[in-house]
Image: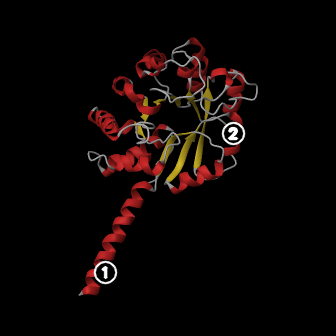
């Protein structure tokens, strides 16, 4: 009898561990940046259950990531770069030290298969709105080549090195003129608007081509649990479960997955959408059965 009870306890524990692993074994992280140790970063992502990721960083550092195999990466073009540098890391964005990449060069890289999306767009750090005329040639390229576009929204941490940064430019409501001008362009709001999440919801309800990632707000080292819960509940109550995507922005993967798992209003199906299904659809990939 003792052996039988022990056997069933073992089955329960094994099933429970498998269920937990299954929850986190398939994640598409749509928002990461480079680090000084690319191989170690990729290993950590893989250990965290991430099989695909969308990365943006300095062009030189990004080239190093192209040589790595797992997880599978989508490569973004980060711009405009304040003083020609990536915020926080102060690495030159481009070899020529410019703040804006030349349009002809961008198109050449797209044709060469080196740019999968435009982003992270740093117009807020540069001190201009998303609808500034300087942005439109890049939007035109994104539309021409059917590339997704991801834009920084919300606030910023200290020491970002961007003298023209303006907090109010992180409001997603400022995207409206762009989305009206490019109604078929795939667009995603990074950080889900953060403190401006209500405006992110408003924009997403008005424009069905807009998605949002949940980086930063999911990070318990940055945003308190109660605010995260309130933010996520608002998105789901608004009926946007098909357009939210998991992302870490280089935060602690385990902590952020744990934060999602603690959301008691999410079903298993909704978690699958959040972890990878919505991202696969947004980036135009097939979802494995």
* Residue 195 screen position, x and y as percent: 38, 27
Q: Quadrant of the C terminus?
A: bottom left
Q: CA distance from mark 2 to mark 1?
A: 52 Å
* Location of residue 235 (image quadrant): top left
Image position of 81 (left or right of 177): right
The percent coordinates of residue 121 (x first, y second) are: 56, 26
Horizontal placement of 274 versus 156: left or right?
left
Which of the pair 5/158 is nearer the observer?
158
Q: Nearer the viewer, residue 218 or 244?
A: 218
- For marks 2 and 1 on the same chain, the one whose residue lies earlier in the sequence: 1
Please name the residue that numbered disc 2 is placed on: 61
Q: Image point 33% across, 35% down: which residue?
A: 227
Please state if 165 lies on the left or on the right of 57 as rendered: left
Q: Residues within 10 Å of mark 1 (few under 14, many from 20)?
A: few
Please provide percent x and percent y for residue 110.
Answer: 66, 32
Query: Which label is found at residue 7?
Result: 1
Residue at the limit of the structure toward the top, as seen here: 133
- For the question of whether residue 208 can be seen, the reply is no
At numbered mark 2, what does the secondary structure look like: helix, strand or loop?
helix
């Amino acid at each position: 009898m003792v052996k039988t009870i022990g056997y069933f306890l073992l089955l329960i524990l094994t099933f429970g561990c498998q269920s937990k692993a299954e929850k986190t074994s398939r994640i598409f992280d749509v928002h990461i940046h480079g680090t000084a140790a690319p191989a170690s970063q990729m290993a950590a992502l893989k250990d965290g259950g991430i099989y695909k990721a969308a990365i943006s960083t300095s062009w030189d550092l990004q080239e190093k990531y192209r040589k790595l195999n797992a997880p599978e990466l989508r490569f973004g073009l980060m711009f405009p770069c304040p003083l020609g540098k990536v915020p926080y890391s102060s690495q030159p964005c481009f070899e020529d030290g410019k703040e804006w990449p030349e349009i002809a060069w961008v198109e050449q890289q797209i044709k060469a298969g080196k740019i999968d999306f435009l982003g992270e767009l740093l117009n807020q750090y540069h001190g201009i709105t998303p609808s500034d005329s300087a942005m439109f040639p890049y939007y035109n390229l994104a539309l021409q080549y059917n590339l997704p576009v991801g834009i920084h929204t919300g606030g910023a941490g200290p020491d970002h090195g961007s003298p023209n940064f303006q907090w109010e430019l992180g409001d997603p409501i400022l995207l409206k003129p762009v989305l009206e001008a490019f109604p078929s362009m795939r667009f995603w709001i990074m950080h889900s608007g953060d403190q401006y999440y209500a405006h992110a919801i408003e924009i997403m309800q008005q424009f069905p081509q807009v998605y949002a990632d949940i980086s930063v707000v999911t990070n318990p080292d940055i945003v308190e649990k109660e605010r995260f819960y309130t933010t996520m509940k608002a998105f789901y109550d608004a009926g946007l479960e098909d357009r939210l995507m998991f992302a870490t922005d280089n935060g602690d993967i385990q902590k952020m997955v744990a934060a999602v798992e603690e959301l008691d209003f999410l079903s298993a199906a909704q978690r699958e959408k959040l972890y990878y299904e919505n991202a696969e659809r947004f980036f135009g990939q097939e979802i494995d059965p």
